[in-house]
Amino acid sequence: MSRPAGDGDARPASPLRALAADAAAQVHRAAVAALAAALGHLLRQQDWARLKLRMHAGAIVRLGVVASGLPAGLPPAEIRLRIESDGLVSAAESHDAPRATLLLEPSAALLADFTRQGVAGLSRHLRVDGAVMLAAALGELARDLRWEAAEDLSRVVGDVAAHRL
């Protein structure tokens, strides 16, 4: 059973469950912030990707995994990101309305397709709603955005050593 909290959210009736739900929400916020920072790092390395996202500045994107059966009080298995005017992303509030939603539906077939085809294999398991152009841009980023590890490593060990590694 849950009881309504002052802000309208359903809160677990047990103090221990409420504490666990609060901790899960804090972890969720920290994970979204870390993911936004990591995506920002990748986007800074790829001018083409930032240009593609700038066209959608201000849009909220909801990314998630269909996860039915989660215990009450836990945050949903999703994140919301805001596309900034410079083409980078930042964490958005959970109540912000998304312009596009991309939900991955986990299954054994998804795992098999991912193992065989990599990121390209996920597309048939992805449910897309909302602005088609924005969703297409996100799909292109998911397919083509890559980490330039040698660029980051060169700052530590130098250009020659980084490219040899």
Image (cartoon, rainbow, N blue to C red):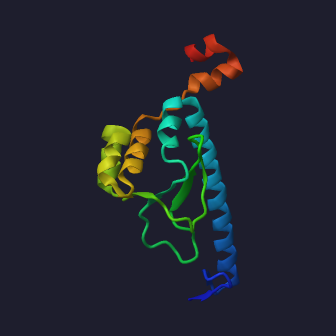
Q: State left or right for residue 135 relative to residue 58.
A: left
Closer to the camera, 80 or 73?
80
- The quarter of the picture where residue 88 lies is top right
Residue 149 at x, y percent in the picture? 57, 27
Work out whether residue 14 can be spotted: yes
Q: Residue at x 59, y 33 (%)?
A: 44
Q: Is residue 112 visible?
A: no
- Number of callouts in the render? 0
Query: Of residues 93 and 162, which is closer to you in this image?
Result: 93
Q: Hey, which quadrant is residue 75 in on the image?
A: bottom right
Which percent across, then down, holds residue 98? 48, 61
Q: Nearer the viewer, residue 87 or 117?
A: 87
- 138 horizontally vs 32: left or right: left
Q: Which residue is rendered at x = 39% and y = 50% of the image?
A: 135
Instruction: Return the x and y of residue 110 as percentages of the image width and height.
Output: 33, 51
Q: Is residue 63 above or below residue 6?
A: above
Whole-percent x and y of residue 28?
62, 61
Q: Residue 151 or 58: which is nearer the viewer?
A: 58
Q: Describe residue 161's horizontal placement relative to residue 122 as left or right.
A: right
Q: Is residue 23 above or below residue 55?
A: below
Picture quarter with the N terminus: bottom right
Say which residue appears at 69% left-offset and 18% top-offset: 157
Q: Which part of the image, by quadrant, shows the C terminus? A: top right
